[in-house]
Amino acid sequence: MKKILFYSDCFIFGGCELVISNILQYEKILKQYKIYFAYRYSHEYEKMLKQHLIPKVIIFHPICIFTLDSYFYRLHNCLINPSLIERGCYKILYLIQKIGLFSMLNFWVLLFLFKKIKPDILHINNGGYPAASSCLIAVFSAKLAGIKKIVFTVNNLAQKQRNILEIIVDKCILSNVNIFTTASKAAAERLAHNRHFDNIINIPNTVRHNYNISNYNLLREEYHIDKSTKIIGSAGILTYRKGFHILIDAIKMLVDEGERNFKLIIFGEGEDRKKLENQIDIIGLNEIILLPGFKNNILEYVNGFDIFILPSIDNEDFPYVILEAMSLQKPIIGTNVAGIPEQIVDGETGFVVEPHNANALKEKISYLLNSGSLILEMGLKSKKRFQDHFIYDSVMDQYDDLYSQLLIEDGKLF
């Protein structure tokens, strides 16, 4: 039986990890290949990995990867309050990382792993590009370990090359990676333009929808919302790039124009919670805008929305949360960021507005709230679009076909 090894380096099990989660639960692939999953160990990652119920037939390899990104994230998003000693230690470790010692250590850690498993295919899952350095290093370790088939998934918009070293590294990676995959055409175009890669294919994101939602009225029952009140909703990390502060501004404009028969509910947690709460307090809309926090059974709550909005302003690709809302028959209002316009058919399944534009967002919300049956009509078209283009089995078959093509004798894809 052929072996596929998946590798990911992220300290939390975030949205881009769902690419792996989906593949690792697809029966057709599980029956054909012996599957290994290697990932950088962290307590947060392990905790969320267990929640995704990945089958026990997968052979897991948590490994020690040397990096400062998790501490850097906490430091710069005020999730911890480091002492002067901790800041000093961080600066020393940062210098060690800059001179390349961490990279050398990670190279040998990965090389040992790859030689031990000897996979026929290595599938690297990266946040963006260049993103996690160990994902780039994995290509070089794989080359030395004799792995000939490499898939590299990029889950966000690629950055521009910054120096001659990056240009050289990219050329080496390009010559050793068989195929890059992106979920959105926007990410593929950015990867080609900013990093000069040409072996790129699109495989959209998907969701394994659980249609056995136990209580279709859970949201209204829990928050005591009557049937005549429309519910505008969103979900995601409460962070600046998600644009929730813009959405709150739009709601303030809507209320100022006399519209009050609705609620805005945003599910999620993040470093911007206090800022958003203060913003809501200042405009006096605590009765209309709710921030209930994180929910494990989020689909049961999203199912109670009348309209779903994702007001992102940056750092997106092909958001899973929009796909989930589409599968639940919701009209979507999203922003013209990355792959979001590829998910929404503007004027048919919802609306696409420019990021940072609270007035445009307000106009589309108002239009939907006051257009009779349009919410239902757009919701039906939204669900049909999900079923036609993003259904789980169809998307997973694209990965299955990719692996099969890679394993033909000459290794050529096209």
Image (cartoon, helix red, strand yellow):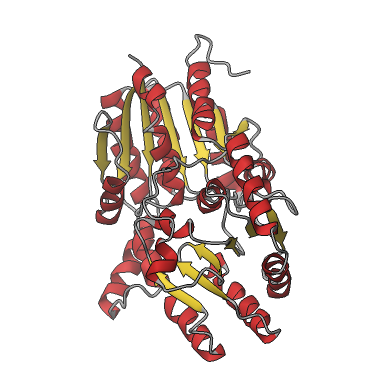
Q: Is residue 130 visible?
A: no
Q: Residue at x 71, y 48 (%)?
A: 345
Up/down of 174 relative to 133, above or below: above
Up/down of 101 relative to 37, above or below: below
Expressed as whole percent of the image width and height from the top left, the position of residue 119 reads 35, 23
Quarter of the figure with residue 182? top right
- Compare residues 402 and 320 and report the one nearer the observer: 320
Expressed as whole percent of the image width and height from the top left, the position of residue 220 reads 44, 67
Q: Residue at x 40, y 54 (%)?
A: 99
Q: Is residue 220 left or right of residue 82?
A: right
- Compare residues 10 and 111 and report the one nearer the observer: 10
Up/down of 395 relative to 187, above or below: above
Quarter of the figure with residue 67? bottom left
Expressed as whole percent of the image width and height from the top left, the position of residue 293 reads 38, 69
Quarter of the figure with residue 215? bottom left
Up/down of 410 relative to 300, above or below: above
Q: Residue at x 32, y 74 (%)?
A: 80
